[in-house]
Amino acid sequence: MILQPVKERLTGWRLFLMSVRGRSYPRIIGMQRDVTWLVFDVLMPIGTVAAYVLIYQAVGAPQDYIGFVVVGGAMTAYWLNVLWGMSSQLYWEKETGNLALYIIAPAPMMSILLGMAIGGIFSSSLRALGVILFCSWLFNVSYEVTSFGLLFLVFMLTMAALYGLGMMTSSIFLLLNREAWHLANLAQEPVYLASGFYFPIRSFPFWIAAGASLIPLTLGLDAMRQLVFPTGASLGFLSVQVEVLLLILLSIGFIWGAKLMLDYMERLARREGRLTDTRK
Amino acid sequence: MNRSTFLRSFITSTWLGWQIESNWADPFLFLVYSIVKPLAGAGIIIVMYGVISKGNFDTPLFTYIYIGNAFYQYVAMVMTGVSWAVIDDREHYKTLKYIYTAPVSVPWYLLGRGVSRFLIATFSVAVTIVFGVIFLHLPIQIQTIQWPLLIASILVGVIMLSLIGVLLAGITLLTVRQSFFIGDVVAGVFFLFCGVIFPIELLPPALQTIGRLLPVTYWIELVRRAMVGQIAEAFPTFSGITEARLFAILVGLTIIYGVISIIVWKVCDRSAREQGLIDWTSNY
């Protein structure tokens, strides 16, 4: 796929779509130009997931818990991508000088972020798929999908809400400077813990699990586990229908919030001269 | 190149690395980051174990897992600290080409950049262990810790991890900025093979062999023996091997991996110069 030079002036939704395509292009094509990511992004992360599986085996956990780890381990790809490829990406773009170019260009920032998200989902999905396929084969994980349609819906809603959250937090990172790395780092393991990536979220008291549900992956993971494992429903936090409803609300809220926050933060960053500030 | 060049490169980059890691961030955020992150990592293990054992943490296996997981923080942080400096300087600050043209030793410069991560890791390990002793009643007592063995093991271990970091830094010179930290990703492989959170007997025999060829396996075992000797020795992996022999194996493997790292670095460094990759930007 080669992007052709723009020969006509586009506006409105056509400009939006072209910008989305333009920003997702380097992420998708870049993966083909340097295939070392296959080793570092797909093969090696399997090691961490397999290690967590073996903890459960060491303590004699039921087989479904091993499946829980595999699904959770696969979904870490999306959280890492939201953290490092969405939220902190605008900080990185500011530091490397691209952010000013995004602002100068007539394309809406939402389209830039959506392009990043689509490119990120593509690469993260490959990593997630690698983890699911390899670990399921290695540890003999069996799935009993009760509804493929509902599973697809839950996954898509989780992605919409998650990347909406990523777009929203990226606007905060517009204002941040060098502490941005620490903030992104800080949101890694604590979210693995709070969202129940490696255990059922129901293991937490209700209100802690409810609070953690503000992170879309908490509800998405719980619903997906309920839909693909025989004991998933008995270990679920809320019913799948309720979780779907909450995911819809989170998706709308985060995407709408992203638009508002981005506009506000961009204005603030312009006013305070932080869009090109890389020293503080 | 005389010895002072190595030392100067190391000391200056140590100072620079510390400034980047700590002084440029808000002190409160830095403190929270240094405490919350390791405790959350330990929390995952605690909840996983607690869910299955119904909250019974008073077992040798839990102590084995907890200590391994706590000290494993050195693995990821030291290796990432050294190798990430390549991306940080090449693509973030765009200073790698200036460092190459300055009278400094680049490998020593990178090793210095890893020191700050080592200091943060030390703090994180201490916080995790203290938390385990106070709240989970881990059977660790200050008077029974074999301090000389612990300090010597950590010292050799950090040198070993730093040298592996140089190897990864060499590879990083030739690769684009990956989505994730290369040091963290490779640490994930060690997490699986080196008996960090489970005895390596759980692995298939072929994979156990990989674990026995990696120095991190011996390092983690030595640290466990120094902390809780009798509990660590009860696990069958190295039950017939004395601490002195384990230490000798660790030193031997550190030398072997050190030589391999230097060779890989030199090959990658030359290749990166030939291909003009020293000021490469690969921001996707």
Image (cartoon, rainbow, N blue to C red):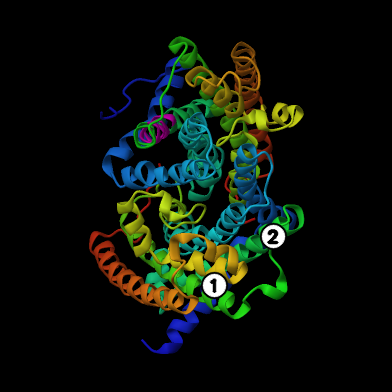
Q: Are marks 1 and 2 in contact (CB under 8 Å)?
A: no
Quadrant of the drawing holding the N terminus of chain B: bottom left
Q: Which residue is mark 2?
A: B127
Provide residue A258's location: percent of width, then percent of height: 62, 26
The amino acid type of the residue labelled 1 equals Ile
Provide residue A43's location: percent of width, then percent of height: 35, 44
Q: Residue at x 52, y 32 (%)?
A: A62
Which region of the structure is painted magenta?
A121-132
Q: Residues within 10 Å of mark 1 (few under 14, many from 20)?
A: some
Residue A104 visible in the snapshot: no
Q: Residue at x 71, y 68 (%)?
A: B141
Q: Residue at x 51, y 46 (%)?
A: A92
Same chain assignment for discs 1 and 2 = yes
Between residue A215 and residue A143, name the one nearer to us: A143
Quadrant of the drawing holding the C terminus of chain B: top left
Residue B42 visible in the snapshot: yes
The amino acid type of the residue labelled 2 equals Val
Provide residue A139's location: percent of width, then percent of height: 39, 36
Q: Which residue is mark 1?
A: B154
Q: For marks 1 and 2, give the CA distance.
A: 16 Å
Q: Quadrant of residue A252?
A: top right
- Horizontally, residue A24 falls left or right of residue B152, namely left
Marked residue chain, label 2 = B
Provide residue B162's location: percent of width, then percent of height: 45, 69
Marked residue chain, label 1 = B
Residue B220, compared with residue B26, is above or below; it is below
Q: Quadrant of residue A19?
A: top left
Between residue A117 and residue B227, name the one nearer to us: B227
Q: Could you say whether the residue bearing mark 2 is in a helix, strand or loop?
A: helix
Q: Could you say whether the residue bearing mark 1 is in a helix, strand or loop?
A: helix
Residue B85, compared with residue A236, is above or below; it is below
Q: Residue at x 50, y 57 (%)?
A: B76
